[in-house]
Image (tube, grey):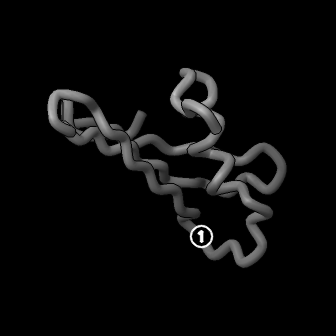
Amino acid sequence: MFEEAENDYLWVTRETPSAHYIDDIIFEFIDNEGGCQLNSKSRSQSNSYFDYDTNYCNMWTVMNGVGGFLGV
């Protein structure tokens, strides 16, 4: 984990296994009428013109692992 603000956001970094790129991933928690909404973003710290959907997978893997995608 890189940084967090409790009940606000969680910022993590991940090193990709093959090319050893470092990616930043942020999960933002938003109060939504008594429920919780989660927004996320992922980006490579260096130029990666062909990331082969790695940034998407960074977010999907976490959300899928905790059961966060309902009906998808």
Hey, which quadrant is residue 59 in on the image? Answer: top right
The x, y position of residue 72, in whole percent, is: 64, 38
**Residue placed farthest to the top in the image?**
66
Residue 39 is left or right of residue 60, and the answer is: left
Tell me which corner region of the image, top left, top right, bottom left or bottom right, holds residue 51: bottom right
> Left or right: where does residue 14 sit relative to residue 3?
right
Residue at 31% x, 44% y is 28
Q: 21 or 27: nearer the eye?
A: 27
Say left or right for 57 vs 66: right
Task: Choose top left, top right, bottom left or bottom right for residue 33.
Answer: top left
**Of residues 58 and 19, the one drawn nearer to the viewer in this rendering:** 58
Q: Position of residue 43 (x, y in %)?
A: 53, 62
65 is higher (above) or lower (below) than 58: above
From the image, tell me which residue sits under label 1.
46
Amino acid type assigned to the residue bearing label 1 in the image? Ser
Considering the numbered disc 1 on the image, is that residue within a helix, a strand or a loop? Answer: loop
Percent across and percent down for residue 18 are 83, 49
Q: Position of residue 38 (x, y in %)?
A: 36, 41
